Amino acid sequence: MSLSLALNSLVGKYALLDASTIFLAQYLLYAFALFLPAFGRNKKAWIQVASTFLLSLAVSKSISFLYYVPRPFLNPSFNQLIPHISDGSFPSDHATMAFAVAIPLYFQYKQLGILALILASLISVARVITGIHYFSDVVGGFAIALVIAIGMKKCLEVKAVEKMFHLHPYGKE
């Protein structure tokens, strides 16, 4: 909690930081739709990003349903910068979704993937600064997306799966 509290203590100190953090925490996730055209006609990449995204979000929601962690802003030591319902905070759905797109993108296109990973990290840190999540919540979202993305990548490399979906190796049509 100390890293989360330290990041959250920045709230209210600098107007520009508050405004930037609000943008990152609430709206930057929508920019991830701009990365999707990079997958082009690569069926394997599309299956990987779609399956990673959907499975990661399903796992995240299931964990949140089974394991309740109150939001940081419910603790009087934390500042709440943006309004949010007081449902469970673990794991972060925003972090899960952002990394579920960024990681498969990294597997396909390294440089664009690095940019997406940086943006996903910015979203995650902003969610902590705003008092919506603990640092462990965003790490949990990252871990879920990473494990599922690697699993889907391995699954799609199995020859039987490639043949079943008429898939070609990454980068080849």
Image: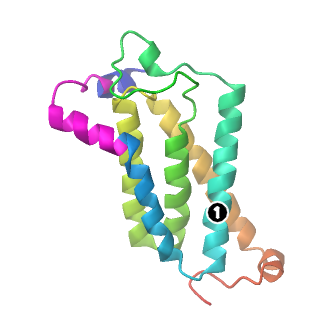
Q: Which residue is situated farthest in the bottom direction here?
A: 173
Q: Would you name the residue on which mark 1 appears?
A: 50
Which of the 4 image quadrants contains residue 62? top right
Measured from the top left, where is residue 64 in percent x and y?
Answer: 65, 31
Residue neighbourhood size for the residue with mark 1, other residues' Cα within 10 Å, grouped as few (<14), some (14–19), many (≥20): some
Type of amino acid under label 1 = Ala
Residue 16 belongs to the span the image colors magenta? yes
The residue positioned 56% from the left and 84% from the top of the image is 171
Q: Foreground residue, 65 or 134?
A: 65
What's the coloring here?
Answer: rainbow
* Left or right: 158 as drawn, with respect to 50: right
Residue 48 vertical placement versus 74 (above, below): below
Q: Secondary structure at mark 1?
A: helix
The residue positioned 47% from the left and 62% from the top of the image is 33
Q: Foreground residue, 87 or 119?
A: 87
* Left or right: 2 as drawn, with respect to 84: left
Measured from the top left, where is residue 69 in percent x and y?
Answer: 58, 21
Which of the 4 image quadrants contains residue 100? bottom right
Main secondary structure of the magenta stretch: helix
Quarter of the picture containing the C terminus is bottom right
Magenta-highlighted residues? 8-24
The residue positioned 51% from the left and 53% from the top of the image is 99
Q: Foreground residue, 71 or 107?
A: 71
Measured from the top left, where is residue 166 in percent x and y?
Answer: 77, 84
Quarter of the picture containing the N terminus is top left
Residue 11 vertical placement versus 78 (above, below): below
Residue 138 vertical placement versus 70 (above, below): below
Q: How many marks?
A: 1
Residue 93 belongs to the span the image colors magenta? no
Measured from the top left, where is residue 19 in percent x and y?
Answer: 23, 38
Q: Which residue is situated farthest in the top direction here?
A: 76
